[in-house]
Image: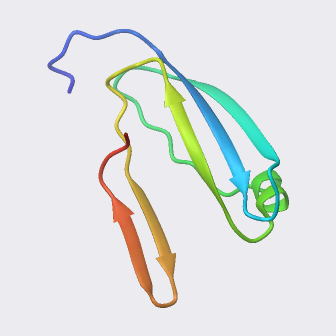
């Protein structure tokens, strides 16, 4: 919330896993206070994941919040928080 006087950047580490084996792909980024990032499936991720996979996200900032949506032909799954 912008009402909070918070100015610490969040160091974010993404680790992508693919279903077919135990290989991982890692990415890092810095997220400014009160900002957002939308993860998109780019060519590198498509080539790495091939068909199916998942991601873990770690941060050194306790104020990071997350939302996710997964769409399937039979329906969708979503969540309003990360652990």
Left or right, residue 42 beside residue 1: right
Spot occupied by residue 60 in the image (x, y as percentages of width and height): 47, 17
Residue positioned 67% across, 58% down in the render = 41
Q: Which residue lies furthest to the front in this view?
A: 22
Left or right, residue 77 beside residue 54: left
The quarter of the displayed image where residue 50 is located:
bottom right
Spot occupied by residue 52 in the image (x, y as percentages of width and height): 69, 68
Residue positioned 40% across, 10% down in the render = 8
Spot occupied by residue 16 in the image (x, y as percentages of width and height): 69, 47
Residue positioned 82% across, 48% down in the render = 23
The structure's colour scheme is: rainbow
Q: Which residue lies furthest to the bottom in this view?
A: 74
User: Toward the viewer: 33 or 74?
Assistant: 74
Question: Taking 61 as reference, is 51 above or below it?
Answer: below
Residue positioned 20% across, 27% down in the render = 1
Quarter placement of the C terminus: top left
Left or right, residue 55 beside residue 5: right
User: Toward the viewer: 14 or 4?
Assistant: 14
User: Toward the viewer: 38 or 67?
Assistant: 67
The quarter of the displayed image where residue 24 is located:
top right
Q: Which residue lies furthest to the left in this view?
A: 3
Count how many numbered circles sit on residues in the image. 0
Spot occupied by residue 64 in the image (x, y as percentages of width and height): 37, 30
Question: Taking 9 as reference, is 22 above or below it?
Answer: below
Question: Taking 77 as reference, is 62 above or below it?
Answer: above
Left or right, residue 52 beside residue 61: right
């Amino acid at each position: 919330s912008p009402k909070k006087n918070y100015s610490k950047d969040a160091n974010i580490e993404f680790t992508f896993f693919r279903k077919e084996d135990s290989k991982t792909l890692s990415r890092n980024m810095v997220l400014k206070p009160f900002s957002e990032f939308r993860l998109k499936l780019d060519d590198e991720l498509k080539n790495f994941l091939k068909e199916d996979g998942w991601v873990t996200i770690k941060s050194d900032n306790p104020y990071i919040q997350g939302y996710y949506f997964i769409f399937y032909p039979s329906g969708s799954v979503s969540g309003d928080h990360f652990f």
